[in-house]
Amino acid sequence: VAREQMVADILAAGRRHLATHGAAALSLRAVARDLGLVSSAVYRYVPSRDDLLTRLLIQGYDELGQTVEDVAQASRRRTPARQWLALAQATRTWALGEPQMWALLYGSPVPGYAAPTDTIDPATRLPRALITLVIAHRPTLDDQAPSPKLQPLLTPIRDQIPPGALSDELIMRALMAWSQVIGSVSFELFGHRKGAVTDYAQYFEQEQLRLAAYLGLG
Amino acid sequence: VAREQMVADILAAGRRHLATHGAAALSLRAVARDLGLVSSAVYRYVPSRDDLLTRLLIQGYDELGQTVEDVAQASRRRTPARQWLALAQATRTWALGEPQMWALLYGSPVPGYAAPTDTIDPATRLPRALITLVIAHRPTLDDQAPSPKLQPLLTPIRDQIPPGALSDELIMRALMAWSQVIGSVSFELFGHRKGAVTDYAQYFEQEQLRLAAYLGLG
DNA sequence: TGTACATCAGTGAACGCGCGTTCACTGATGTAC
DNA sequence: TGTACATCAGTGAACGCGCGTTCACTGATGTAC
C-alpha cells in the first residue's frame, strides 16, 4: 500500500542523507525536510531515529552481502585465487561507492546507539561468502604442528561451519583474511594509505592475491 | 606560565570528554563547563573546536607512538617474532585503554573535519616502529619471482626507508602487516569479532605470531 | 445512492536541550615612570 | 614609594542554528449501513 511506499521513501531519504552527510548527521528532521513533511509526520512511519539507523544498517549489510554473493556466483568458474580476489574487490568497490555507509557498518560505532540483534544476521553474509569459498576448495596447508591453542579458541566459529570442513589452522587464517579485507578497505577509505603507495587498486590486488595464497588458494 | 597550564587543562578536559563521550560529542562548551568557565573564555586559549580536535589527535598519535617505541626498546633482546608480538600487543592494549581515542585515530573520519598536515608526522611513529623492526632483522624470504608490478607501486614508501634495506616483497608484506594490526584491533574494538572466538587476547596473539612468520620473523 | 462515522496522514506549536562563535564589558594584575 | 596606564583573563548576553519527541488538532478518505 501507500504506507509501505512512504516508509520506503523515508528510508531512501535517510540513505541519501547518510551518503552525503554521514551517519552522525542523519536526523529525522532532515529526512522530513527532504520529503516536504513536517518533522512530526515521520513518526507515523518510523518510531525513532535509532530505528531508522537500524534499518539503514541492515540495508547496508544486506546490499554488501548480496553484492558479494552475486560476485561469488558469477566468478565460480575461475581459479580459487581469482575468486577470492573477485570477492575482495567487490567489497572494496562497494565501499568506494558508499563510503559513508561503509563507515557506518565498519567504522566507529555511532555514539549513543547500540545496534540491536536484528543486524547480526545480515552482517554475517559477507564473512559467510568468504568462508564458503575457502571451504569449497578445501585447501591443504602444510599444517606442520597443529597448534593445540587454536582448538578451544575457535569453538564459536567452528560451530557455524560444517564439521570437519576446515582444519583449525585454516579457520584461523580465514578469520585473519576476513578482518584483513575489512581492515584494508577501511584503512584506504579512512585515509591512512596516503603517501604509502602509488595506486590503491593495484595495491589492493597485490595484497589480496597474497592473502589468497596464504589461504592455500594459490 | 599560567597560560600554558590553562591550555594543558583544556586539553586534559577535552581528553576526558573524548574518552567518556566520544569525539562527536567533544565540544568547547562541554570543556568550558568542566573547567568552570564560561564558554567564551576558552577562546582565549584555543582558537576553535577543530583546533582542539587536532591537538587531541596529535596527542593520541604521539602517545601511541611513544608507547610502541618504548616497547620496541624494552623488548629488543627477544626473538624477532616475540618483538613483533610485543609491538602488536602494545598497540592493542593501548587501544583497549583508550577506545574512543583509538576510534578518533583510526575509525570513521569526524564529519566536517579534515585533519591538517601537522597530524601526519605523529601518525607515522607507529608504522615507523613496525618497519624498523622488520629492517633490523632483514629477513630473507623465498622470494620466488619478484613481481615486477610491485616496483612502481611501492615507490612512495620505498623512498622513506634506507635504500636496499628491504626487498619489494618484504615492503609489501610489511604494509599488509601494518594495516592488519590496525584493522584487527579496530575489528575487535568495534564489535565485529563477537561470536567468532572465545578469547580476543589469545586470538590476537595467534594472529600476530602468524603475521610475524609471514614477515619472515619466524 | 446517500448519509454517519471511523480511520489516519499530516499539521503546527511547543518543550527542552545542545552547539560554535562574536562582542562589548569588567576588573584584577603587572609594568613604567 | 606612589600613581597612571596597559594588558588580558574571564563574563554574560546574544545570534543563529541544529536536534528528538510529544500532543492536540484538522481534514480528507474510505467503510458500513
Image (cartoon, coloured by chain):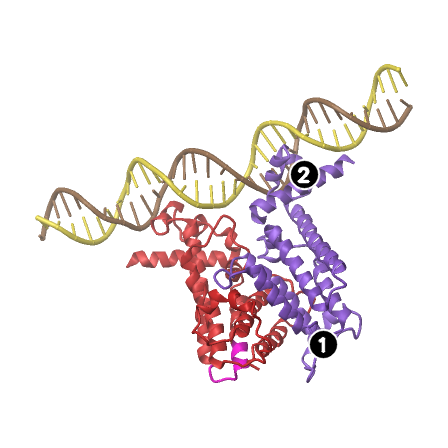
Chain colours: A purple, B red, C yellow, D brown
Q: Residue A168: give its label.
A: 1
In this rendering, does residue B53 appear at all? Answer: yes
In this rendering, does residue A121 appear at all? Answer: no
| Residue in view at x 70 percent, y 60 percent | A126
What residue is shown with label 2? A43
Q: Which quarter of the image is occupied by the C terminus of chain A?
A: bottom right
Q: Is residue B80 magenta?
A: yes
Q: Residue B173: give its label.
A: none
Q: Residues within 10 Å of mark 1 (few under 14, many from 20)?
A: many
Disc 2 is attached to a residue of which chain? A
Q: Nearer the viewer, residue B105 or B155?
A: B155
The residues colored magenta run: B75-86
Label 1: which secondary element: helix
The percent position of residue B128, horizontal first and vertical second, equals 46, 70
Question: Which quarter of the picture shows residue B63?
Answer: bottom left
Q: Amino acid at mark 2?
A: Tyr
Give the left or right position of residue A109, taking residue A61 as reference. Answer: left
The percent position of residue C32, horizontal first and vertical second, equals 12, 50
Q: Amino acid at mark 1?
A: Asp
Q: Nearer the viewer, residue A92 or D17?
A: A92
Q: CA distance from mark 2 to mark 1?
A: 49 Å
| Residue in view at x 60 percent, y 73 percent | B204
Q: Residues within 10 Å of mark 2 (few under 14, many from 20)?
A: few
Label 2: which secondary element: helix
Q: Is residue B144 magenta?
A: no
| Residue in view at x 76 percent, y 62 percent | A76
**Height in image: B205 above or below B52?**
below
Q: How many marks?
A: 2
Same chain for the residues under marks 2 and 1 in the image: yes
